[in-house]
Image (cartoon, rainbow, N blue to C red):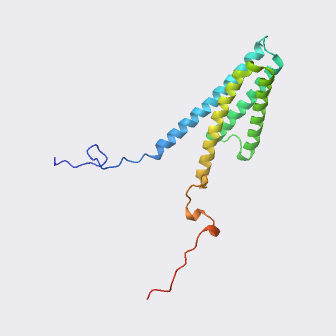
Amino acid sequence: MSGRPIRHGSRTDRGAEPAPRSAGGARSIRKGSLLLLVAVVGVVAAMTLASLAGFIRRPDPTVKAGPMYVTLTLTSISTLLMLVMALSVTYARIVPRRQSANVQLVMWATGLTGLITGLLTLGKDASPIVTRFVFASLAYVFIMLQDARLARARTGAPGPAGAETHPAATPARYRRTRQRRGGRKR
């Protein structure tokens, strides 16, 4: 023996398990990923507004102006609502929880109407708009999934089907009761 004490967690201690990661690391990764997803939605909203402003200032003569205005206006409204909802869910409560379902309905309805209008009337000229909207929609869906998972964790509700639950969390009518067999010990 070398006379030096073996420190736990060092390279000389072969049997020690690695120290568990702190919850702060997972929290910072979650915040970073949410920031990135909100940034994607924000960039798409800015690009859609810039496309709308550019087409209003200088319309392309090879593209049908009426359907392009409708497509750009509806998708701009939808991506702006998507950005507001993403910010409301992640950082600052802008839209109350009771109204968020209504705002989401308007957001998806205007976005899909704009996309369908663009695809049916403009064809390939609407493909950049469709691509941007799909990217923003994917980022928004991931934000909403993360929010639902965090809300479920906050309330202590059980996760997906088949997950283990704590016996105290199950309703009383489903719990098994233990009965003593036999009499008292003598």
Q: Identify which residue is drawn at 75% across, 35% down.
A: 108
Task: Tell me the quarter of the image containing the C terminus.
Answer: bottom left
Question: Residue 47, located in which quarter of the rendered image?
Answer: top right
Q: In the image, is residue 3 above or below residue 45?
A: below
Question: Residue 31, located in which quarter of the rendered image?
Answer: top right
Q: In the image, is residue 5 above or below residue 41?
A: below
Which residue is at the front of the view, 171 or 163?
Answer: 163
Horizontal and vertical percent position of residue 58:
76, 12
Horizontal and vertical percent position of residue 35:
57, 34
Horizontal and vertical percent position of residue 38:
61, 33
Hey, which residue is sitting farthest bottom in the picture?
186
For the image, the number of numbered tags is: 0
Q: In the image, is residue 40 above or below residue 150?
A: above
Q: Identify which residue is drawn at 66% across, 31% down.
A: 136
In this picture, residue 119 sits left or right of residue 84: right
In this picture, residue 185 sits left or right of residue 111: left
Q: Is residue 91 visible?
A: no
Q: In the image, is residue 85 above or below residue 70?
A: below
Q: Identify which residue is drawn at 78% across, 11% down.
A: 62
Horizontal and vertical percent position of residue 169:
59, 62
Q: Identify which residue is drawn at 71% across, 22% down.
A: 127
Which residue is at the front of the view, 97 or 179?
Answer: 179
Q: Is residue 71 visible?
A: yes
